[in-house]
Image (tube, rainbow, N blue to C red):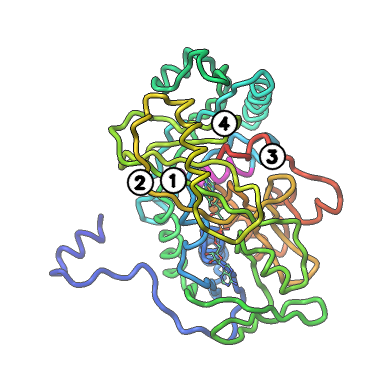
Amino acid sequence: MIELIRQGLNGGQPMRRMWQQSELRDRYDVVIVGGGVHGLAAAYYLAKDHGIRDVAVLEKNYLGSGGSGRNTTIIRSNYLTPEGVQFYDESVRLYETLSTELNFNLLFSQRGHLTLAHTDSAVRTMRWRAEVNQLQGVDSRLIWPDEIARLCPLLDLSDRPRYPIQAALYHPPGGIIRHDAVVWGYAAGADQAGVHLHQLTEVTGLEVVDGKVSGVKTTRGTIKTGCVLNATAGWCTLISDMAGVQLPVTTHPLQACVSEALKPFLDVIVVSGSLHVYVSQSDRGELVMGAAVDPYQSYSMNSTLGFLENIAGHMLELFPTLHDVKILRQWAGLCDMTPDYSPIMGFTPVEGFLIDVGWGTYGFKAGPVSGKRMAELIATNRTPDLLAPFALARFRDGQLVGEKGAASVGH
Ligand SMILES: Cc1cc2nc3c(=O)[nH]c(=O)nc-3n(C[C@H](O)[C@H](O)[C@H](O)COP(=O)(O)OP(=O)(O)OC[C@H]3O[C@@H](n4cnc5c(N)ncnc54)[C@H](O)[C@@H]3O)c2cc1C
């Protein structure tokens, strides 16, 4: 607002750019690969919380061109494991004050999140999640069809559908946000703090000498550094392979679509794991819809007609009155899936080579907390308690953080 008034008084001078184009230096203290919400948030908190400003973010495309600009923006913390709930809860709390912190309106709308249960076993899982959530102080409870009807009157709660709705996990703090704004806000904050953001700069190799990272090869030259953070989500194994670090990650496409704009009728986010569909209504009135990942590994970001047919059929089981609604557009992004549906963050066997990956279909909501805590890890060379359960070593030690029951489809 202040910026708008200043511009008005300025007689129409061009607005200040959100971030500058800096010279690419031949050395930085920290190099972050990936200009999505994770890489940018880590850069922002490194500069802001720890005064580490000699940082470059390298992005092969444009900032936010990966999952961070393609997701369906659902933010929540009603996960299944105590480790997951604590972690995502810190992110929700950071998101609650992020517009003020970045001085940029991110349009965060905490409208409530409903995960539907269509079977007895799903009701049991929702009850389990509600118990775990409440023990961690997260607002989340099991509700029944009468309350579901009040929250979402257009849902078909009859016994007509193949899988009638029996109950739902209700999570009032769950919400949606403007994803581009989050990316731009962190980018602007990092830039103002002195971080260099380099778009159209692809990492093509890593230099590792005696088990320690010493440099990054890019399409614009080599950069010397002793610290590299891999924040490339769907491309993360390609970067880790350059350091000789193998990750238990496979990359799958994930598709989404939006309908034409409709008069507002859907105040909550609705998720059905059984029907592989979730939906929210954007501020513009469009229905933003998604599903499970495509069942094959690929780096393709093509959309398919099969996805659209499936999602339309499942949406009509939930909302039969929407049969005339038209689809406006569809798209896809890449998801870095781990065996336990939890991320991998922290140190690797190569000194100075750090990872913030394995974000699957649920990483956008984690941008603030992983950025903040990965920055702390880099600055202190110690793993913060919140990140400890998500170390790469858990796959060697058999200490998985099983989140499939809460992460799959239910963004
Ligand atoms: C359709 C869809 C819906 C989703 N919905 C949700 C949701 O509702 N809620 C939620 O929490 N999450 C959701 N996700 C997941 C979420 O989008 C991602 O987990 C998250 O955005 C990952 O952020 P990131 O910063 O780690 O990676 P990205 O945003 O993918 O950024 C990685 C960047 O690395 C760059 N890069 C790759 N290789 C190189 C290289 N060699 N050199 C330089 N740069 C490179 C890429 O260009 C990319 O910009 C969804 C994802 C998709 C695709």
Measuring from the top left, give residue 22's x and y in whole percent. 44, 80
- The magenta span reads 87-97
Q: Most prominent secondary structure in the magenta stretch?
A: helix
Mark 2–mark 4 CB contact (< 8 Å): no
Question: How far apart, in angstroms, are the residues tagged by discs 3 and 4?
Answer: 18 Å
Tag 3 or tag 2, which sits nearer the N-term? 2
The amino acid sitting under disc 4 is Leu
Q: Is residue 82 magenta?
A: no
What crowding class fits label 2: few (fewer than 14 Cα within 10 Å), some (14-19), or many (20 or more)?
few
Tag 4 or tag 3, which sits nearer the N-term? 4
Residue at the spot of label 4? 275
For the C terminus, the quadrant is top right
Mark 2–mark 3 CB contact (< 8 Å): no
**Residue 375 shows up from this direction:** no
Question: How far apart, in angstroms, are the residues tagged by discs 2 and 3?
Answer: 32 Å
Residue at the spot of label 1? 257
Secondary structure, mark 1, is strand
Residue at the spot of label 2? 328
295 left or right, relative to 316: right
Mark 2–mark 1 CB contact (< 8 Å): yes
The amino acid sitting under disc 1 is Cys
**Marks 3, 1: nearer the viewer:** 1
Secondary structure, mark 4, is loop
Secondary structure, mark 3, is loop
Judging depth in this view, the residue of 187 and 61 nearest the camera is 61
Tag 1 or tag 2, which sits nearer the N-term? 1
Q: Is residue 90 magenta?
A: yes
What residue is drawn where x is 54% and y is 74%?
56
The amino acid sitting under disc 2 is Leu
Question: How far apart, in angstroms, are the residues tagged by discs 2 and 1?
Answer: 8 Å
